[in-house]
Image: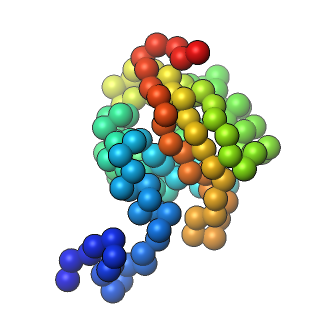
Amino acid sequence: MTSTPEQPEQNETYDPIAELVRVNPVPSIIVDMETFSVVVVNEATTALLGYSEQELLSKSILELVPAEDIAAVEHAADEPPPEGETLWRCFRKDGATLYLRLKYRETIFRDRPARFIVTLESSLNPLH
């Protein structure tokens, strides 16, 4: 039996939030805000960052940002507004630094606090 968004296989649980990320044509992820783990990622994100889906799902977002940005990422998780827009730096698999303009929204994913993040703009040069 094959799986479709409308009818998942018997052993799968259809999750509309995960499906929204997967079908989104722009780079999008869901991050567990307690562990900072990437829990859902789409093809546009894998293309942008150069990692496979499995590689990203095995990472924390703290592994994808420069060391000097980790404290800011952790602080943003401590005092989250329900939604917003921000600028972040992120590493591609090839080591290049990307500058990203992100839109995010707090959500609950699999009964855990999470953040749905969409990349609005990306560049190899700083964004303003």
Residue at the image point whose x is 60% and y is 27% from the top:
87
Q: Quadrant of residue 89?
A: top right
Nearest to the observer: residue 38 or residue 101: 101
**The furthest residue to the left:** 1
Q: Quadrant of residue 10?
A: bottom left
Nearest to the observer: residue 19 or residue 58: 19
Q: Quadrant of the C terminus?
A: top right
Left or right of 4, for residue 74: right
Residue at the image point whose x is 68% and y is 46% from the top:
83
Residue 118 spot, x, y in % from top left: 50, 42
In the rendered view, how is the structure colored? rainbow
Q: Is residue 85 above or below residue 113?
A: above
Q: Is residue 93 visible?
A: yes
Left or right of 38, for residue 73: right
**The furthest residue to the right:** 79
Residue 32 spot, x, y in % from top left: 59, 55
Residue 106 spot, x, y in % from top left: 66, 53
Q: Is residue 90 visible?
A: no
Q: Quadrant of the N terminus?
A: bottom left
Residue at the image point whose x is 34% and y is 42% from the top:
44
Residue at the image point whose x is 32% and y is 80% from the top:
7
Q: How many marks?
A: 0
Q: Quadrant of residue 9?
A: bottom left
Residue 17 spot, x, y in % from top left: 50, 63
